[in-house]
Amino acid sequence: MVFASKKPRLRAALNLQVAVVLVAMLTALWVLVWPRLERYFLLQAAEQNEVTLPLASDSLRAALDRYAPLPHLIAQSPTLGALLRAPGAPGAVAAANTELLNTALAVSASDVYVMGVDGTALAASNYYKGEGSFIGNNFSFRPYFTQALDGGLGRYFALGTTSGERGYFYATPVRDGPEIVGVVAVKFTVDAFEENWRGAASEVIVTDVNGVVAMSSQRPWHFRTTQRLDDEKLKAIALNRQYPLDQLTPLDMQRRALSGSADIATVGGMEYVASSAEVIETAGWSVTSLVPTAGARTQAMWVLAVFALVGLFAILAVAAWRQRGLQAAAVQRELEARVRERTDALRIEVEERRATEAELRRTQASLVQAGKLSALGQMSAALSHEFNQPLAAVKSYAENAGSFLDRGQTQQARENITRISGLADRMARISKHLRNFARRPDEASGPVALDKIIEDAVAVVEPRLKRDAITLDIAGPEAAAVVNGGHVRLQQVVVNLLTNAADASGPGGRVVLGAAPLEGGWQVTVRDFGAGIPQDAQSQMFDPFFTTKETGKGLGLGLSISFNIVRDFGGTLWGRNHPEGGAVFGVDLRAAEGVQEAAE
Ligand code: ADP
């Protein structure tokens, strides 16, 4: 119950501690661990770029490599040469058209066409498209045309003016001897790569030399600008009709460095880990791979959550363990306090018991005395007879001695005086026994001679026995019997037993007093031939003040006092009915140490 007030306080203190530690742990996780975790997973995402980026740029490079030599090969065709030499010759255009279509189909090019030196397309693989065909269109504004006309390999990326399709153009001059008579161009579209990029985990952007998005896995990003275009560049784009000008709006891409090779890029509100690489084949072009950071962040969040959970469990486990410890300590303290209280209470109890015992001993001593006086009271009649009879004899001997002296019979007078002296000795002996018996015992226990005790006890009881004509038979003990006890107190015990036996026997009865060796001691028995111990007295006869004798005859203290005396000497007092009638009481006493062998 004492815990009732302590427990909630303890728990509240612990809860507060747990809350503080939890907040500290979460703060530490957020401030110290989260940035590292986030960076770790973003770098992992950057590693994914390291895979995507080469794939994207390789596919682009492969395409570029594949188409670059084509115009040159086509330019060798005699059909084209014939056409350029004589554009108006019948069948020349048709033959060239057919050849160009076959070539385009063979190499999977979007378009293959041939232009005169003025830039007008004379034949084209898409001749069959009618309005959509390049034939008749002038491409002199295209840089690839001018580059080829200058004798080099023309290359250019642009939105097709006729087709409306983005494409990469390669062009070479067609020569007739040293003279350039026309230009052959091959266009291939980029939709196929983009198709491959789409649906992958990362986005791909290919920017041209001006930073315009030429290709991307995201259609809305086409033609968006990643850097500011100055007027000159815009003018050139317009002149070359490279891109639709109205679509050249900024992509809104912010980049900040993540590592040496990767950035964090925000594009249209979405965040990515971006890595870029130059496309060597086309100067100024670059490929960028963008992996969304959301995945990396989610992974980092999960790991952080696992850390937080582990931390939480650890804190709760420690808290539970500590709470148990504190409770155990509180219980321990409580127990100790209770033990102290109980010990104090016990000490007080022990002191009280000691005081009570001392009081009891005092009471017992006075009861012993009372018991003896009671015995004396009972015996007083016998005693007065015992004294009166010798006194009467002394008186008559003295009177006779006087008469003998008067008559000069000194011899008779002397005999009488000798008898008087003998009687005086006898009375002195009786008086001595009585004095010893009545005296308060202050003796310590120790070796005492059993025969002397019996002798003195018998002397005290003798007058009473004589008065009632009770026969006392004494058997033992040997002179060497020495027991542990006190002379006067053991004498009192024997007197009590003899008195009770005399009471039970009644006038003319017989009492047998025996003393025999016992294992490790001596046994004194007093047997009578009376009515025996009444049934109801058997369990109570050793209780103080229990008596079956009529008022004035017994105090009920004799056996109780005797019992305690014998017990004090380490012996036992017992009593039972004899199978052959009457009662027998016994005192078992320990032989005194050191003289035990002599006693046996
Ligand atoms: P008291 O002799 O004053 O009655 P005791 O304590 O000596 O007190 O004896 C208690 C009772 O034990 C007696 O009243 C009697 O009933 C019984 N008792 C004791 N000795 C004998 C005996 N020798 N024979 C029968 N009963 C006895």
Image (cartoon, helix red, strand yellow):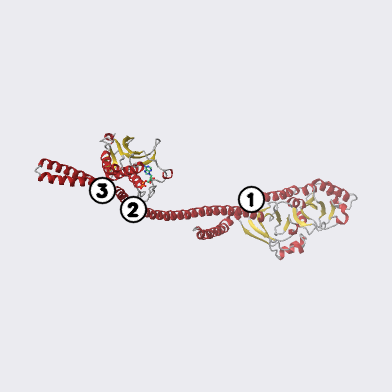
Identify the residue position indicated by label 1 in the image: 47
Please state which of residues 536 and 116 is positioned toward the viewer in this rendering: 536
| Residue 263 falls left or right of residue 564 | right
Please state which of residues 518 and 104 is positioned toward the viewer in this rendering: 518
**Which residue sits furthest left?**
408
Q: Is 58 drawn above or below residue 146 in the view shown?
A: above
Q: Nearer the viewer, mark 2 or mark 1?
A: 2
Q: Position of residue 191 (x, y in %)?
A: 77, 52
CA–CA distance in space, label 2 to label 1:
105 Å
- Give the structural element (helix, strand or loop) at label 2: helix
Q: Amino acid at mark 1?
A: Glu
Please state which of residues 440 and 113 is positioned toward the viewer in this rendering: 440
Q: Earlier in the sequence, mark 2 or mark 1?
A: 1
Identify the residue position indicated by label 2 in the image: 363
Q: Is residue 328 visible?
A: yes
Identify the residue position indicated by label 3 in the image: 384
**Can you tell me which quadrant of the image ligand 1 is in?**
top left
Q: Is residue 486 visible?
A: no
CA–CA distance in space, label 3 to label 2:
30 Å
Callout 2: 10 Å neighbours few (<14), some, many (20+)? Answer: few
Mark 2 within 8 Å of ligand 1, using the beta carbon: no
Q: Earlier in the sequence, mark 3 or mark 2?
A: 2
CA–CA distance in space, label 3 to label 1:
133 Å
